[in-house]
Image (cartoon, coloured by chain):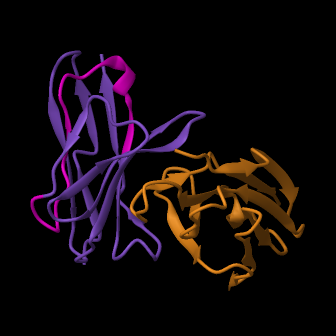
Chain colours: A orange, B purple
């Protein structure tokens, strides 16, 4: 099993700041890269699933890019709001030739101060 | 449409007891997975299934069994509970694995 790594572990920003964080994953046998948002006391919710090198996805103020050749993805939040405070997880199927073995990174915890 | 339903929400077990955590989805999803969440460890994959009758081990399968006799249900069995299995357990499902997974609300298990 190959690891999915996320950085930074935590991030504190002011309301209105733009921010980004990184997910690195094994580039060999790549299937897909998932991003999830996990609010405290709730369950993770899917943001994006990306499969193609160079893919860019956007949902409101949140966007993500994918580089499968070098094995990284960036998540960007433009003009952070307090309601963006959450842990952001990335995940990828990293072994076994199946997309069912979705392995998660440990997440980046974002805190947005008003 | 209930999504992914996990029962129970909370459970306390004594060391050595066995139990089954239930997971059911009504979205006709083929892919289902069990994760455990521990502080500082993130979500770790226990077992997963890509369809009825097919299961495979994840990162941390020891001490757990699963079966998938129907598309809807994917129960997780703890054979002989240990304090190290104290955790929050999440079940998740996806139609084909190529779109985002839908998570259940979790089961908080304490083993004393």
The N terminus of chain B, quarter of image = bottom left
- Furthest residue to the left? B69
The answer to which image quadrant residue B77 occupies is top left
Q: Looking at the picture, how far across and down is residue B83, in whole percent?
A: 34, 18
The C terminus of chain B, quarter of image = top left
Query: Going by the image, does B69 lie left or right of A60?
Result: left
The answer to if A3 sits in the magenta stretch is no
Query: Going by the image, does B65 lie left or right of A23?
Result: left
The answer to which image quadrant residue A33 occupies is bottom right
The answer to which image quadrant residue A9 occupies is top right
Q: Looking at the picture, how far across and down is residue B20, in whole percent?
A: 16, 40
Q: Looking at the picture, how far across and down is residue A62, in whole percent?
A: 72, 76
Q: Looking at the picture, how far across and down is residue A29, in whole percent?
A: 56, 64
Q: Is residue B25 above or below residue B91?
A: below
Q: Nearer the viewer, residue B112 or B49?
A: B49
- The answer to whether residue A59 shows anywhere in this view is no
Query: Going by the image, does B107 lie left or right of A37?
Result: left
- The answer to whether residue B95 shows anywhere in this view is yes
Q: Residue at x 77, y 67 (%)?
A: A74
> Magenta part of the protein: which range?
B69-89
The answer to if B75 sits in the magenta stretch is yes
Q: Nearer the viewer, residue B61 or A85?
A: B61
Q: Residue at x 74, y 81 (%)?
A: A54
Q: Residue at x 64, y 81 (%)?
A: A52
Q: Is residue A28 above or below residue B76?
A: below
Number of numbered discs visible in the structure rendering? 0
């Amino acid at each position: 099993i190959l690891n999915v790594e996320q950085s930074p572990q935590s991030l504190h920003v002011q309301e209105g700041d733009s921010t980004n964080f990184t997910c690195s994953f094994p580039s060999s046998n790549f299937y897909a890269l998932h991003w999830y948002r996990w609010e405290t006391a709730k369950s993770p919710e899917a943001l994006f699933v990306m499969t193609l090198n160079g893919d860019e996805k956007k949902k409101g103020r949140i966007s993500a890019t994918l580089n499968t050749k070098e094995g990284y993805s960036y998540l960007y939040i433009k003009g952070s709001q307090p309601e963006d405070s959450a842990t952001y997880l990335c995940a990828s199927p990293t072994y076994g030739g199946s997309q069912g073995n979705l392995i998660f990174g440990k997440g980046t915890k974002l805190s947005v101060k008003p | 449409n209930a999504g992914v339903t996990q029962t129970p929400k909370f459970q306390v077990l004594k060391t050595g007891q066995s139990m089954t955590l239930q997971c059911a989805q009504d979205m006709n999803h083929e892919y289902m997975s069990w994760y455990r969440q521990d502080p500082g460890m993130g979500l770790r994959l226990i077992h997963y299934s890509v369809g009825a009758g097919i299961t495979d081990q994840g990162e941390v399968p020891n001490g757990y069994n699963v079966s998938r006799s129907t598309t809807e249900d994917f129960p997780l069995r703890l054979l002989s509970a240990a304090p190290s299995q104290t955790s929050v357990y999440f079940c998740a499902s996806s139609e084909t694995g190529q779109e985002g997974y839908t998570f259940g609300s979790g089961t908080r298990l304490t083993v004393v």
